[in-house]
Image (spheres, rainbow, N blue to C red):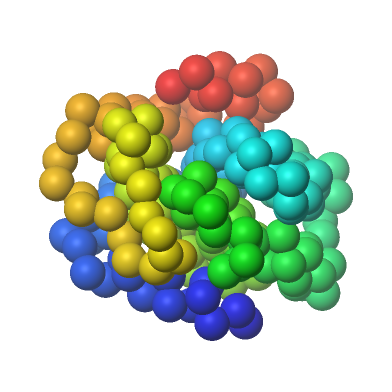
């Protein structure tokens, strides 16, 4: 497994947020947890697209295909084998920006989009809630990076250091999005996941 991916996943242990969101996620069914991951991947996917357009490097279609695989598993249309999922993970790792594709903070946003996609794919194999906890944590932190970027934040290095996670309006909105999504997914009527339900949840 990519060492950068493993290092970044370990960051989740440095904050109290993972414990809080883990408790909320624990009430969801396996499919609901995966749907939380898939919808959060969709939420960050535009960050990768924006990076690819700016850097003229990368392959957003790889992330798109990974998200499709999640939705197919959720809908029971196709059950990807572990080998197929691992193949997708390899492709996502290859599409993750490296040192040579790191001109500004937009690359960190693209990396986070890759990391949460990897974590969601990993969940399809392991059913380990920690993979979805990582999705929630990195999505929360990505909005801080986006906020810094919009404010003109810049860095001359490709450090893997995470942003200052002091509470901001953008982070509060992301936390609320996650909590609202979990609340909707925990309702009895959402136990049967339909395309209409998924479309409605995309606006949460």
Image coordinates of residue 148 in percent, x first then y, are 31, 39
Taking the view exactly as shown, the residue that stands out farthest to the front is: 156
Along the line of sight, which residue is nearer the eye, 137 or 166? Answer: 166
Rendered position, 1 above or below 85: below
- Left/right of residue 46 with respect to residue 160 in the rendered view: right
- Left/right of residue 120 with respect to residue 168 in the rendered view: right
Rendered position, 153 above or below 10: above
Image coordinates of residue 74 in percent, x first then y, are 69, 44
Q: Residue at x 36, y 47 (%)?
A: 154
The answer to whether any part of residue 172 appears in the image is yes
Q: Residue at x 20, y 62 (%)?
A: 15
Q: Residue at x 43, y 77 (%)?
A: 7
The answer to whether any part of residue 30 appears in the image is no
Q: Residue at x 66, y 46 (%)?
A: 55
Along the line of sight, which residue is nearer the eye, 108 or 80? Answer: 108
Along the line of sight, which residue is nearer the eye, 187 or 79? Answer: 79
Q: Tell me the quarter of the picture where residue 84 sits.
A: bottom right
Q: Which of the image's four quarters has the N terminus?
A: bottom right
Rendered position, 58 above or below 41: below
Rendered position, 94 above or below 116: below
Image coordinates of residue 113 in percent, x first then y, are 55, 49
Q: How many marks?
A: 0
Q: Which of the image's four quarters has the C terminus?
A: top left
């Amino acid at each position: 497994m990519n060492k950068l991916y493993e290092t970044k996943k370990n960051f989740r242990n440095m904050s109290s947020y993972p414990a809080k969101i883990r408790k909320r996620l624990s009430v969801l069914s396996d499919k609901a947890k995966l749907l939380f991951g898939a919808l959060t991947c969709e939420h960050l996917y535009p960050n990768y697209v924006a990076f690819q357009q700016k850097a003229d490097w990368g392959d957003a279609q790889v992330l798109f295909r990974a998200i499709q695989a999640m939705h197919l598993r959720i809908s029971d249309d196709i059950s990807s084998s572990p080998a197929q999922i691992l193949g997708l993970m390899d492709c996502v790792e290859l599409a993750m920006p490296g040192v040579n594709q790191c001109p500004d903070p937009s690359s960190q946003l693209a990396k986070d989009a890759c990391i949460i996609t990897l974590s969601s794919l990993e969940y399809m194999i392991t059913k380990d809630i920690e993979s979805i906890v990582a999705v929630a944590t990195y999505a929360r932190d990505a909005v801080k990076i986006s906020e810094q970027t919009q404010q003109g934040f810049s860095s001359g290095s490709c450090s893997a250091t995470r942003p200052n996670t002091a509470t901001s309006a953008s982070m509060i909105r992301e936390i609320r999005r996650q909590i609202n999504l979990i609340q909707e997914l925990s309702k009895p009527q959402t136990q049967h996941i339909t395309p209409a339900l998924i479309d409605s949840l995309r606006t949460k």
